Image (cartoon, helix red, strand yellow):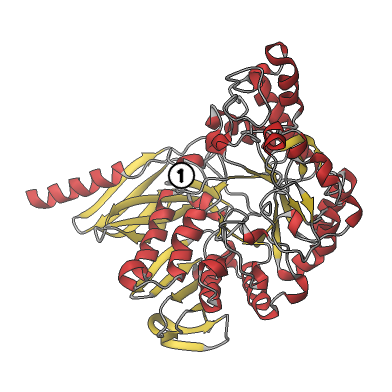
Amino acid sequence: MKRFQALALFLGLALAQTHDPQDPAQFSRLPEGYSVRFQAPAEEVREAWVVQGGAFPMARQLVYGGKEVWRGLIPEAAPYALRVRGKAGEKVLGPFRPPQRPFAALAWVGERGGYQVFPDRFQNGDPSNDALALEDDEYRYNQVWQQRGGPLPHLSAWQDPPSPLHCCHQYYGGDLKGLLERLPYLADLGVGLLYLNPLFRSGSAHGYDTHDYLKVAPRLGDEALLCQVLDRAHALGIRVLFDFVPNHTGLGFFAFQDVVKRGPASPYWNWYFVRRYPFVPGDASAYEAWWGVGSLPKLNTGNPEVRAYLLGVAERWVRFGFDGVRVDVPEDLLEAKGFFRDLKARLRAINPEAYLVGEIWRRAPDWVGEGAFDSLMNYAIGRDIVLRYAQGLHPALFGGVRALSLLAETYAQYPEAAAAMGFNLISSHDTSRLLSDLGGNAAKARLAWALLFALPGTPVVWQGEECGLLGEKEPLDLGRRPIPWGSCDGEFRLFLQGLYRLKAQEPALRGSLFATYLAEGGLLSFFRGEGEERLLLAFNNQAASASLPLPQGTWRDLLTGEAFRGQAEVPGLGARYLKKASR
């Protein structure tokens, strides 16, 4: 009897320690209700309920590393208790009081797939504005570059090969008119969220060295054209994010130029961190610069004037019509978390559905929440898990077991609301193209995309990936080459179009719920959704086919139309999107 009581007490204490409603990973708001989760040692819990008036059943959601996460939904943010039945008996934990403002998922995020556009390399719709790029280029302001000589910024025809300045100062003429022309193409592909690399006046092709936060880069067009792009995108059901760079400016930014001319007498002297004056613009030894790059002087976001200016910039573009913002290198700002807490509050006051994404490559659950980002750029999922799995290493190194455990651990650490709003990508302007990372193996690339589209949140495709393009990151950022639309791979595009379609059509893929199922060898499988809409997703990163035992009933593969009972063969380097057939 004493042993029984001790086990029951241990179980109760363990669960109490791993459920905290103030932790967004344990309590968050979804469009369909409030997600309540607790963690327990594996196999300790047999049944559980959330008690709030009635008893709402909980289910084992995630299993990894000797731990389990149990999850249930309740209809309101009111006090509740947990009733847990385990090996040692039954215990009621709580009551627990939810937070006054639980972290909430935006209903629209995650309902469709996304797409990233790097404007200069997407489509040239107006060649007459191409030469304006050279008038704004960093070279005009960077005296170090002027003194040392070397290659100069230049214009190129769309089909020209990359030059030594390909990354940043070789301009191909892509612009907003070209994007406007391609919006129907993106809508036909199935895109519902568009992320645009910087559009504002800057000193490079990539645009991360801002010269004017309040003006569209003339080489891309003007505000009237941007307004047309946003209106047309919205009419096609596409939401649009702009890229915001608050950590540093370019050399041509008005405040930095005033510091160059007036030194300590400049009212903007404390907008930067100047070590030595006078100085030559481009000399990073004279002032603090991002990663020591002289063309990117760091802003003092601890200065209230700088904060007010930057927050006003973001507000201006959300009022203009953007649906949210992707923020460049947020961890590098001074007093960063306070800045982004203020940013979110101010943008949500303008648009309650504004979506905020932070460029953080690692797992960082402390950077998402009610007073933080809605999602990070989830390279930690897309590259650290999906890409490595698709590379098809020996199962002992990175097979289904390792991949499923990492996915489960990731989704345990993040709020379910954050999973629902996940900004999930494998490749971008900052990486090699997926096909290059996979040695040109198209089957592995299809496997990677199938897995990414099966996960909660929004899968984001880097421009041109649907064309099956190659492009290494080093040494020239070849993934940024202009898209050769005339030779875009139709078969690969059709495959991705099918994934976009399933993402939009299947309620389970639009929702947030991810639950582990089975993994062994190269086989990886999990559930999405609940009830009649539930899907069983299965993947195989080995060359030989693998057998997946199925739950009771007949299951139909949404990718091929095949039906299975008892078990399904998952092809080598293949995927199954399985849905239980209705009776």
Residue 425, how many percent across, how many down?
A: 57, 59
Image position of 575 (left or right of 254): left
Residue furthest toward the left?
Answer: 2
Residue 156, how many percent across, how many down?
A: 79, 58
Image position of 10 (left or right of 276): left
Residue 240, how many percent across, how many down?
A: 73, 52
Image position of 565 (left or right of 281): left
Residue 75 in view here: no
Report the residue at 42% width, 82% height from top.
543
Where residue 547 sits, quadrant-wise, is bottom left
Where residue 279 sits, quadrant-wise, is top right
- Under circle 1, the secondary element is loop
Where residue 506 sits, quadrant-wise, is bottom right
Q: Is residue 412 above or below residue 302?
A: below
Report the residue at 40% width, 53% height from top.
412
Image position of 487 (left or right of 425): right
The total of numbered circles placed on residues is: 1
- Compare residues 16 and 516 and report the one nearer the observer: 516
- Compare residues 82 and 219 and report the one nearer the observer: 219
Q: Amino acid at mark 1?
A: Ala
Residue 452 in view here: yes
Q: Mark 1: give few (<14), some (14-19) or many (20+) Cα within 10 Å.
A: some
Which residue has dot 1 on it?
364
